[in-house]
Amino acid sequence: MEKYNKLLRNITELIEKGLFSSKDLKKEVEDSLNLKMQIIANKLNLVSREEFEIQKKILQKLQKDLIKLNKIKIKKKSKKAKKS
């Protein structure tokens, strides 16, 4: 928060001195926001849509495999129960 306040103070001083135009201000704010968004995105460990879709397909396949394995396990248990 202190960095944000310092940035605003610096921008305000430059505008008061006439050294900073509204175009410069817009560019500075956009750059600052883009940097903050990148930092936040990196902390969240976000993945691309393509990576997400690949992982989703892998999980769906694994779920189907688990269901098949559970069915096989149940059949084996029922066969053992019948033999006993």
Image (spheres, rainbow, N blue to C red):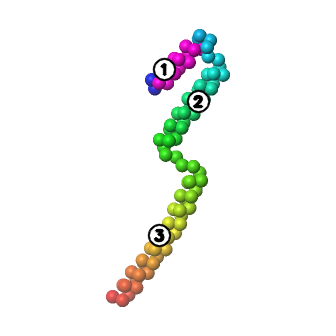
What secondary structure is the stretch in magenta mostly built from?
A: helix
Label 2 belongs to which residue?
31
Q: Amino acid at mark 2?
A: Asp
Q: Which mark is residue 6?
A: 1
Instruction: Determine contact: label 1, label 3, CB under 8 Å.
Output: no
The disc, 2 or 1, on the residue closer to the chain's N-terminal end is 1
The disc, 2 or 3, on the residue closer to the chain's N-terminal end is 2
Tell me the SS state at disc 1. helix
Name the residue at 44% across, 81% down: 75
Residue numbers of the magenta segment: 3-15
Please state if 41 lies on the left or on the right of 76 as rendered: right
Please state if 16 lies on the left or on the right of 78 as rendered: right
Residue 57 x, y percent position in the rendering: 56, 61
For residue 62, above or below residue 20: below
Q: CA gap, disc 2 to disc 1?
A: 16 Å
Q: CA gap, disc 2 to disc 3?
A: 48 Å
The disc, 1 or 3, on the residue closer to the chain's N-terminal end is 1
Tell me the SS state at disc 2. helix
Residue 6 x, y percent position in the rendering: 48, 20
For residue 5, above or below residue 37: above
Residue 31 x, y percent position in the rendering: 58, 30
For residue 34, above or below residue 73: above
Q: Which mark is residue 66?
A: 3
Q: Amino acid at mark 3?
A: Leu
Name the residue at 53% across, 58% down: 55
Tell me the SS state at disc 3. helix
Residue neighbourhood size for the residue with mark 2, other residues' Cα within 10 Å, grouped as few (<14), some (14–19), many (≥20)? few
- Toward the viewer: 24 or 67? 24
Q: CA gap, disc 1 to disc 3?
A: 56 Å
* Nearest-to-viewer mark from 1 and 3: 1
Quadrant holding the C terminus:
bottom left
